[in-house]
Image (cartoon, rainbow, N blue to C red):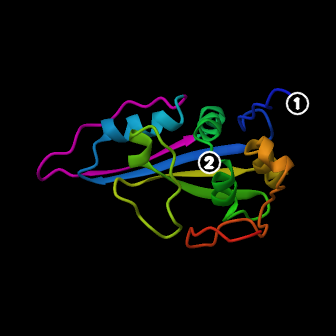
Amino acid sequence: MDGPRLRLTGIGEGFSTQIRTTLSGADSPRRVLEAVQSLFPDIEHEPEEEPCFGKPTSLTWTFEDISLGPFLQQLHEQRILDTALDAMSMSLNGKSTTFHLSRLAALAGKIAFPIPGDEPLGGVVQVSISGDGLDDWLQAATWHAGRSQIPRHINDEHGMDEDGESTTWV
């Protein structure tokens, strides 16, 4: 029988986190903040004025050292841990990684990892994590009991292709 799951957050664990999103055109600061806070509720920000005709939004918000705990909890609840491991480690470069999340999916209470290079409708939230042992931390943060039967690790043959298609394996 499995014991209680380790609750990782990235805070106080030797990692720095950065959450970043860019608003442009008709993006509503209020709705974008709602989307970002649905993933990272610890973020506090006073939204700027709503865009209007002739006065488009043009902002970039950056938040440092935000807990990833609620985001990781949602990954577990939505049962997308293998996808998360693949997406979060796709740009892993030694001690750092950056990945994107769909803001529109976040408004619907879901986590979606856009295909690298795509700019989904509604924009993205960029998440950067850095620190020693990041590969081990990502694997621990996305661990689930199914990995006892089918072990997974970063860049294994069970991952998804760069275009988001699943790799077929037996």
Identified at 58% across, 70% down, the residue is: 165
Q: Is residue 56 magenta?
A: yes
**Secondary structure found at label 1:** loop
Q: What residue is shown at x 59% (from left), y 57% (from top)?
A: 99
- The kind of residue on which mark 1 rests is Met
Q: Identify whether 136 is placed above or below 37.
A: below
Q: Position of residue 150 (x, y in %)?
A: 82, 55
Where in the figure is residue 102, as x and y percent of width and height?
A: 45, 52
Q: Earlier in the sequence, mark 1 or mark 2?
A: 1
Q: Which residue is mark 1?
A: 1
Say whether marks 1 and 2 touch (CB < 8 Å): no
x%, y% of residue 141? 75, 42
Question: From what the image shows, is residue 155 above or below residue 26?
Answer: below
Q: Is residue 23 left or right of residue 52?
A: right
User: Badge 2 is on which residue?
Assistant: 80
Q: In percent of the image, x 80 and y 32: which residue is there?
A: 6
Image coordinates for residue 124, horizontal then vertical, percent: 44, 54
Residue flagged by tag 2: what amino acid is it? Ile
Q: Single out the residue that lies furthest toward the left.
A: 53
| Label 2 element class | loop
Specify the segment rendered in magenta.
42-63
User: Distance between the Cα atoms at labels 1 and 2?
Assistant: 22 Å
Q: Residue shown at 65%/67% (left/top)?
A: 160
**Residue situated in front as seen by the camera: 103 or 84:** 84
